[in-house]
Image (cartoon, helix red, strand yellow):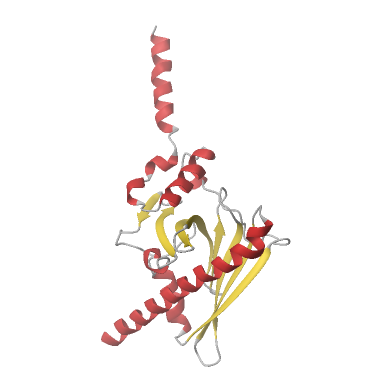
């Protein structure tokens, strides 16, 4: 009898331990329905029990043959050091938030924490940070949730690499390069390598809406840079 009681207790303990990792997230603090659905699908579908089990679709140095490539260039009349620092410390609730793109939440795989869109504290980007954003397409007629993990931050060459997550529509990576110009300003190259299971989506839909989304992101960052400059002048 004691043996069966022991098994019952052990089973209950294991059931508590094996809870889905999405249960650690307060879904009521995520306003976008598509983001909530994506998280549930990714975590439950892959039976993830911990944030560390979230998987990206890109590994650093991976051969991207067969992927479609997009590149956009942005020129900012600001000091490269200030630009680099601002892109690192700006909260995703500011940078990934506009008419088309809205920030859902951030998961830190290594610190096992969650940041919601109305949280005030943000320590800056780090590898293992997983961003979930919502894309409002055709003025909201269609919404698409996207998950991106920061997989590399190169402080020497100054680049930030994001990877799409397993379980999403797209596979591949996005890398933002920060390049000093001769006049002391900054050129930003936003490089994207992507593919999905749909030729129509990859050929026509993704490039169009992707450019709108990243244009909005970099406009937000330009505004944040302007605010940083004002703070520097005030000091």
Q: Is residue 26 visible?
A: no
- Asked if residue 93 is positioned above or below residue 23 in the image, the reply reads below
- Asked if residue 20 is positioned above or below residue 39 in the image, the reply reads above
Q: Is residue 215 left or right of residue 197?
A: left
**Where the N terminus falls, by quadrant?**
top left
Q: Residue at x 45, y 64 (%)?
A: 139
Outermost residue to the right: 65
State the image coordinates of residue 195 (x, y, percent, origin top left): 65, 58
Residue 193 or residue 82, whichever sits in front:
193
**Where the C terminus falls, by quadrant?**
bottom left
Q: Is residue 57 left or right of residue 119?
A: right
Q: Residue at x 35, y 80 (%)?
A: 228
State the image coordinates of residue 82 (x, y, percent, origin top left): 42, 80
Residue 225 falls in image quadrant: bottom left
State the image coordinates of residue 150 (x, y, percent, origin top left): 51, 60
Q: Residue at x 40, y 66 (%)?
A: 97
């Amino acid at each position: 009898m004691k043996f069966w009681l022991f098994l019952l207790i052990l089973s209950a303990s294991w059931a508590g331990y094996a809870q889905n990792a999405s249960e650690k997230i307060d879904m009521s603090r995520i306003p976008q329905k598509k983001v909530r659905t994506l998280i549930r699908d990714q975590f439950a579908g892959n039976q993830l029990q911990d944030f560390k089990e979230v998987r990206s679709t890109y590994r650093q140095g991976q051969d991207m043959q067969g992927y479609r490539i997009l590149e956009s260039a942005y020129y900012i009349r600001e000091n490269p050091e200030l630009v680099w620092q601002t892109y690192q410390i700006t909260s995703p609730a500011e940078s990934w938030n506009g008419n088309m793109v809205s920030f859902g939440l951030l998961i830190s795989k290594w610190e096992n924490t969650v940041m919601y869109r109305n949280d005030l504290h943000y320590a800056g980007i780090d590898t293992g940070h997983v961003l979930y954003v919502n894309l409002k397409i055709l003025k909201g007629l269609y919404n698409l949730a996207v998950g991106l993990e920061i997989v590399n931050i190169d402080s020497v060459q100054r680049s930030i690499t994001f990877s799409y997550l397993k379980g999403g529509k797209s596979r591949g990576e996005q890398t933002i390069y920060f390049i000093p110009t001769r006049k002391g300003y900054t050129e930003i190259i936003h490089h994207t390598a992507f593919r999905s299971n749909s030729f129509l989506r990859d050929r026509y839909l993704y490039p169009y809406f992707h450019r709108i989304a990243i244009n909005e992101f970099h406009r937000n960052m330009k505004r944040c840079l302007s605010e940083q400059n004002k703070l520097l002048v005030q000091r």
